[in-house]
Amino acid sequence: MTGGTRFVCAFRGARDSYQAALALAESDLLDTLITDAYGTPPAVRWLPRGVRARFAGRTAPGLPPERVRSLWSTTIVEHTRHALGFSKRGTWLKLDRRFGEAAAERARRVQANLLMYSPYAWEAFTADYAHTPKRVLFQYHPHPDLESRLLADDRRAFPGFRESSGDDASPPAGELPISERDSWRHAEAIICSSTFTRRSLIAAGCDERICRVIPYGIDLPPERDASGGRRFEVLFVGSGGQRKGLHHLLMAWQRSALAAGSRLTLVCRVIDHGIRDLARSMHDVEIREGVSAPELDDLYARSHLMAMPSLVEGFGHVYLEALARGCPVLGTPNSALPDLGGEQDGIFIVPAGDVDLLASQLKALSRRLTGDPALRAAARAVAARHPWSAFRARVREVATQ
């Protein structure tokens, strides 16, 4: 017996602004979204005021709240363990399986299909069912074997730099749990947010015929005038760790011999100690923490370039956020950038981990971008071609094929 038309979807946090679940809900294909904490007023009013504000933003217009189930116990356990100093990675591995188990229980009860984000899919995909659910996997990170190899190689080449949260670096490939490595083996259809992610699955043995690349989208913000001057301004936005290539960016910045007055601004919620020390040793680098959304918009407006030379990205949504604000971007092919455009679109790509080439590109762009304002319009046009509505429509196509 096959499953019905509706899907159970599961993930922790406000993953992708709930767009995959919303894609299903818009066509009445969503049975239940299982998440950790969804911020409907009845659910959050019992929380302390400071905590309440944090979760109040975890909602999505158009997503029926009655179809969302929050596993609040996982949120309580997660934050308690973090406060007590337990490994964040160990905590997530312990808790993530609960989302898959809850999804399996619900799908079994109502004979639903499954659209599961990759860290939470194993328990749901491998459970026993009286019906035959369609199993759709959303692989939003590259295959972890590739990820762990890239990070290990970089640690050997550039010792002393870690992930921004201390214990989040991927373990060696042989130590990865099977749930992280092999959920794709049980999927009938797989959504990848970039060609880079798709290639990583194919390299692991996945049938390329079931892998579909669906780039993320964005809601285009109001257009505003750029306030950048002749001084070269570069912006980094992201977690300040090895994965994002921030150590490469800082070393390249040192080597690039840019004109006096050039400035690199780092917007990081968290940052690795070694990377922080390196940044603080440089007089033309500023670290900004606790930046509000309006402040970040101002930084995009005054910056000539948003640079994030990541070692490994499933997509890199901050690239699209920068482009939507007319800010050209610099990154690596280990991301979605090759899927979005080329240099004519304000998208510049250098090989991951090549500090010398990165320094040369920064030098060249310091001359080009301060005298080429037309690239800002081209960058914004890239984002205009990727609305969230198109992403949702393509997710529904995969779910209903």
Image (cartoon, helix red, strand yellow):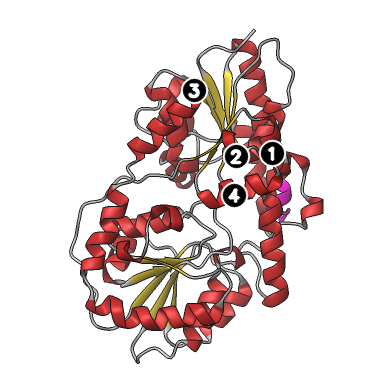
Query: Which dot, 1 or 4, sits closer to the camera?
Result: 4
> Does label 4 or label 3 sit earlier along the sequence?
4
Earlier in the chain: of badge 4 and badge 2, it is 4
Please determine whether, in this image, residue 358 is positioned above or below residue 98: below
Q: CA distance from mark 4 to mark 3?
A: 22 Å
Q: CA distance from mark 2 to mark 3?
A: 16 Å
**Dots 1 and 2: beta carbons under 8 Å?**
no
Q: Quadrant of residue 337?
A: bottom left
Instruction: Answer with left or right where residue 92 lies relative to residue 358.
Output: right
Observer able to see residue 356: yes
Q: In the image, is residue 313 part of the stretch drawn in magenta?
A: no
**Residue at screen point 43% across, 91% down:** 257
Mark 3: amino acid: Gln
**Residue under label 2:** 208
The magenta region covers 85-91
| Whole-number angstrom distance, CA of label 3 to CA of label 1 | 32 Å
Question: Tag 1: residue type?
Answer: Leu
Residue at (44% x, 45% y) in the render:
215
Q: Earlier in the sequence, mark 2 or mark 3?
A: 2
Name the residue carrying label 1: 95
Estimate how packed mark 4 is, as few (under 14), some (14 to 19) or many (20 or more) residues with alpha carbons within 10 Å: some
Q: Secondary structure at mark 2?
A: helix
Q: Amino acid at mark 2?
A: Glu
